[in-house]
Image (tube, grey):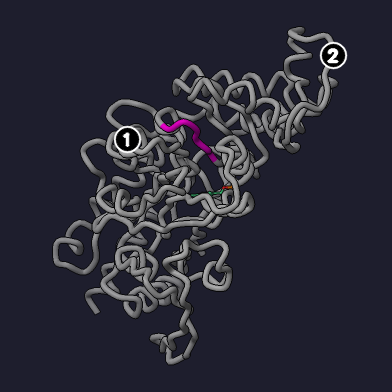
Amino acid sequence: MIPFNKPFLTGKEAHYIYQAVYGGKLSGNGAYTRKCQRYFEEHYGFRKALMTTSCTDALEMAAILCDIKPGDEVIAPSYTFVSTVLAFVRQGARIVFCDSCKDNPDIDPDRIEALITERTRVIVPVHYAGVACDMDRIMDIARRHDLLVVEDAAQAIDSYYKGRALGSIGHLACFSFHETKNVIAGEGGLLAVNDERFVRRSEIIWEKGTNRSEFFRGEVNKYGWVDTGSSFLPSELISAFLWAQIENLDTIQTRRKEIWERYHAGLSDLAGQGCFELPVIPDYATNNAHMFYIVCRSLQERTALIAHLKQNGILSVFHYLSLHKSPFYTSHAEARPDNCQAVDTVTVTEFDGTVSDEAQVVGLDLPHCDRFADCLLRLPMYYELSDHDVDYIIDKIHSFFNA
Ligand SMILES: *Cc1c(COP(=O)(O)O)cnc(C)c1O
């Protein structure tokens, strides 16, 4: 069986963990944590980088830093992972979902402004598949309406927008080192703080609401409880693991891009015949080869293709279901803006004949998001995937469409 993902080990992880263990400092904010943070600050131009236990946690820190209060509105795409909006919902925010672009799942900048009200505080662009959202346009909208921008850069390590690293453009940005991402630590994340106003407070929230970091630097002679916060910093073991990955970042990225290009070249004939769409990388964006996907013509065809690939020993997956149709959002009025209250249930008959109830928020129509939810299919993508396996997968996709 060709798995969908296989975590890649560089070989140095256990060694660095060993060093951390016997170095006598296991809690957070030690030598490896600082090495990782310095790397990200220097290579990607983040004003401040803070390691976190996950991207979800980094987003929670961002929601606290944005000072989100109950009733505040946050604009985000619906085609994304739950964590993008969950952090804001925990602070009492109402989520205003925006549709994706027609030809790529990123938030459509043409649709953002119509969603802004006097309660809007934050826009959360998600760089889907590591491909940049149109950040100049989004930052311009934010400036004109006095909003904050939090980049969900979970998939976007080492990717760029007009030459600027993703994660360095918004006021705040959040990365993931979950084992399904390009560079991993098992579970882990990073908060990038780019706006000077948030630098000091971010460290305090990170350290359980205390000014312990300032104390360790000798800036104050005792530390205590000064703000809200949580234990967002990971242990040294996580950063030691991540350091081994960072050292090999270029090697990892080079191989992933080769795999991506091989898929793209091998499938372009079928795409040309209209069997499916290939990913679109806008001129302003780079490709960090986080994922390779195709967009099928219909849910039925995608379901059949997944089954065909599985019969041939290949695991392909779809993922995000539209968040605006999720059981949580449709049943929690306090998470929605006032103008989309009415909830109805429609019955959907699946390709295989099963009937399911799908919740609908009336007044919220996001057709591009729904199309990606129904039709986007992710193919196996990991460092150790061989050219031979990629060719085999391409071949089996051909046999499906030629049948
Ligand atoms: C993976 C992912 C997350 C969550 O990352 P964790 O580190 O698992 O918390 C959030 N947003 C997006 C877009 C992701 O892909």
Which range of residues does the magenta coloring cover?
Answer: 170-175
Q: Say what secondary structure mark 1 lies in.
A: helix
Q: What residue lies at 77% left-to-right and 13% top-to-bottom?
A: 216
Relative placement, left or right, of 153 versus 184 is left
Instruction: Give yes or no for residue 385 being in the magenta stretch.
Output: no
Indicate if the residue with disc 2 has its beta carbon within 8 Å of ligand 1: no
Q: Sequence order check: which comes first, mark 2 or mark 1?
A: 1
State the mark number for residue 222.
Answer: 2
Residue 396 visible in the picture: no
- Residue 284 lies in what quarter of the image? top left
Q: Horizontal and vertical percent for residue 153?
A: 46, 40
Q: Using the image, tell me which numbered label, if any, was put on residue 57.
A: none
Q: At x 34% / y 51%, what residue is drawn?
A: 107
| Closer-to-camera residue (252/285) | 285
Q: Most extreme residue toward the front, as rendered? A: 118
Query: In the rendered view, would you say 183 is above or below 292?
Result: above
Residue type at the position of mark 2:
Lys
* Quadrant of image for the C terminus: bottom left
Q: Quadrant of residue 396?
A: bottom left
Indicate whether 263 appears above or below 310: above
Q: Is residue 210 above or below residue 396?
A: above
From the top left corner, tell me how far across and down residue 109 is, in percent: 28, 47
